[in-house]
Image: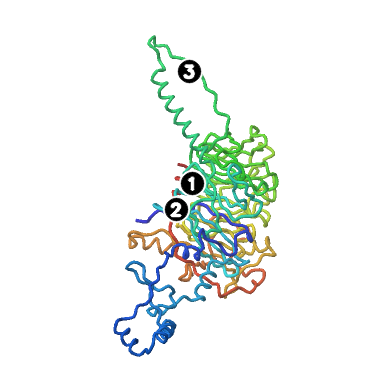
Amino acid sequence: RRSVTMIAAVAWARRGVPAAIPRTEAPLDEVRSSSTPTETSARPIARDDQRANQSGKRGAIGNDIEDSDEDDDNIETLPSLRANLMYYRDNEQDPNLTLHDDDDDDDSEMNDFTLESTDLMLIGARSEEQFSTLEVYVYEEPLDNLYAHHDIPLPVFPLCLAWLDCRPVNRLHSNASSSSASNMVAVGTFAPQIEVWDLDVLDALEPVAVLGAGGSLAAMDAETAKAAEAMAAQGRGVDKAGKKKRKKKKKESAGAAGHTDAIMSLAWNAQQRNVLASGSADHTVRLWDLTGNHDQSLLSLCHHTDKVQSLAWHASEASLLLTASFDRTASVVDVRTPDSARNFPLAADVEAAVWDPHNSHLFVAANENGSLQCYDARTTAGAVWQLQAHSKPASGLDFNAAAHGVLATGSVDKTVKLWSVEGDQPKLIASRDMQLGKIFTVHFSRDSPALLAVGGSKGKLGVWNTLEYEAMQKKLPNAEAALGGDGRVLGGAVAGIGALDVNSSEDEEDDAVGAPMGGDKSGSVREDDDDDLDNGGDGGAGEPVAGPSETRQVRTSRARSSRGIKVGRKARHSGRRA
């Protein structure tokens, strides 16, 4: 039996924001000094026979004192005594230790965690049946090498991520400033609160902030009280005469509180850095002030009638928010006038929705039936174009911020596709099976726009360098890529541990299908690039060719392999709707 494992969400950190040398909650030197008990030294005591021999040699008391001082200087260091425990104060003094601390080993270990200027950081929400983690990866772009840097245990299944550079500060309890850029990530889970974690802390045990903890508890208490009142009213709803009593309507509380169900979507406002939007299974969208009251939201939007699956802030209009729900509508809302939501019909339950960064009035929604729909936010006349992109749910969707009209989609049909949407009808550029199982999320890097991060049902994260296709090289003429010995672009790095097989023999054939193609033992994949395009159309698709220019000199000394990491848990596609 194969255990359920997956990467449900992926986010890129902006280059230069993560700390070059991450920190820990308690530095090792401090831990060592604080945990070492107070030592009680025992003065070495010579044996009686040794004392007798020494006393026979000494001629006078004065000489005896001098000789005693000399013996103290020359005596071998003995262990310290504490109760019945004997130990040496310093490992260098212990004759039983042949391998002593080596500064070179410490430096090597530190280098494993040190980020170089060319490194990129990714965050993946990983889940397995019994465990969930927030995994931090580092992608060495000159080497096309992806490895796990560190991970953070999560108490609840993660559903969505949003990277942000604003450190949360609760003004009610602190006067600290959050003006400097910080390496943070907001995590939405099946719990009705939002956790914000510091990614520069290797051994973080608690989030920096929890948004909506107090408000969600108050809201759930109110829901419980309302349900209890409804049940009681149902029992006394008919009087003795058989006439139904009229119930007086109570006014709803106007104060914004918190979510009462799972957090299914998050969106950070890069222009208004202290604002975070969240969509929930409770049908609401809420705005949070990262530098204000963390217990209650700033604003609650209730224009949807079902779970809110996707959110996206406009690239240039800071107040415009795109929302998409399982009520089969996408909405554009100006949060300054929240009652003025403009709704657009969708063909099926939505999976993702994004703004076109190059056409500010257009947005695209990906649906459960595998279709894509593009709308003009200025009018409700109908879709600009529609496309049946996949045969199964199109669960991942993202625009390339640098290449005009390039859209990436990922699907439960296990394929990742690149589309050109510059005309009236999209054209297929490329299609690839990343060997990651069912695809749940795709995201382009804003710092290296040719790189596409992909997460799927096998619990691994992959990075596809799309420059292996000539059509992408033309759209990104100044981009650089690492080249292999055959001159082809390296672009299929994979990191992470996949699903664990309880009965591996039964799934041997399936494992062979999902095994890395041409990969080394480290887990990095070098996949054959002559994938067949299953959706037809040329669109510039073809066999990958060499990059437009040779990559700069790379650091071969830091070619690290993908290391073993903790596996996590999560509930996939249908679970996201719980």
Residue at which label 2 appears: 132
Image quadrant where one finds the C terminus: top left
Q: Can you see residue 477?
A: yes
x, y percentage for residue 450? 62, 61
CB of mark 2 within 8 Å of CB of mark 1? yes
Report the residue that reaches farthest toward the left.
49
Side of 240 relative to 259 (left or right): left
What numbered label is drawn on residue 189? 1
Measured along the vertical axis of the image, is residue 149 above or below residue 65?
Answer: above
| Mark 2 closeness class: few <14, some 14–19, many ≥20 residues within 10 Å | many
Percent of width and height locating residue 519? 48, 69
Of residues 97 and 570, which is closer to you in this image? 97
**How far is mark 1 from mark 3, CA to CA?**
37 Å
Spatial distance from mark 2 to mark 3, Cα to Cα?
A: 46 Å
Residue where numbered disc 3 is placed: 247
Helix, strand or loop at mark 1: strand
Residue type at mark 3 is Lys
Residue ID at (69%, 39%): 378
Q: Residues within 10 Å of mark 3 (few under 14, many from 20)?
A: few
Residue 75 lies, with reference to residue 203, above or below; the image says: below
Q: Is residue 178 above or below residue 229?
A: below
**Percent from the top left, x then y, of residue 442?**
55, 54
Q: Amino acid at mark 1?
A: Thr
Callout 2 amino acid: Ser
Residue located 55% across and 49% down the image: 186
